[in-house]
Image (cartoon, helix red, strand yellow):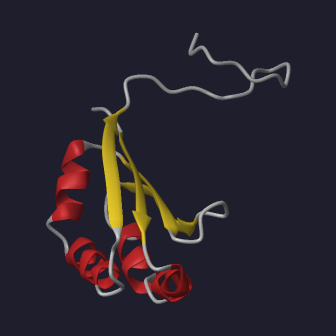
């Protein structure tokens, strides 16, 4: 069973982004309470006033499928849509390897060995 990671960027009117994120908390909390949800983060991009960065981590494809069939997914989709999405790009990744960024020596490493 492989984990699933979702990375997305959503662009909203910069004047509406803060409110859109602040008022989305119930959908975020709902997703976080779902079985198989490891991370579910929607946050403002500090380099782009229109962009919302999304990072999700799910225990399995089944957990993600359950999320997509759940009211929290539909609710967040409708919520963000009500703020006028300008553009959105999202990708999902099946994780085949995982490891720490820093070794025992405290130095970052790019390998998984």
List x then y, in percent, for residue 41: 50, 63
List x then y, in percent, for residue 43: 55, 67
Visible residue check, residue 103: yes
Along the horizontal axis of the image, is 87 left or right of 66? right
Residue nearest the viewer, comparing 49 with 25: 49
Residue at coordinates 28% horizontally, 43% vertically from top-left? 60
Along the horizontal axis of the image, is 69 left or right of 42? left
Residue at coordinates 59% horizontally, 63% vertically from top-left? 48
Along the horizontal axis of the image, is 89 left or right of 68? right
Residue nearest the viewer, comparing 15 with 103: 15
Residue nearest the viewer, comparing 77 with 40: 77
Residue positioned most to the left: 69
Q: How many marks?
A: 0
Q: Quadrant of the N terminus?
A: top left
List x then y, in percent, for residue 81: 28, 80
Visible residue check, residue 41: no
Q: Is residue 99 above or below residue 9?
A: above
* Residue 94 position by quadrant: top left
Q: Is residue 14 above or below residue 59?
A: below
């Amino acid at each position: 069973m492989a984990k699933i990671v979702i990375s997305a960027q959503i662009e909203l009117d910069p004047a509406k982004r803060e409110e859109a994120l602040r008022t989305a908390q119930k959908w975020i909390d709902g997703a976080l309470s779902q079985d198989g949800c490891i991370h579910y983060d929607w946050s403002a991009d500090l380099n782009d006033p229109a962009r919302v960065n999304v990072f999700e981590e799910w225990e399995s494809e089944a957990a993600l499928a359950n999320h997509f069939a759940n009211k929290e997914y539909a609710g967040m989709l409708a919520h963000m849509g009500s703020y006028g999405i300008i553009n959105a790009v999202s990708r999902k990744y099946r994780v085949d390897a995982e490891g720490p960024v820093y070794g025992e020596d405290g130095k970052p490493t790019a390998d998984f060995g």
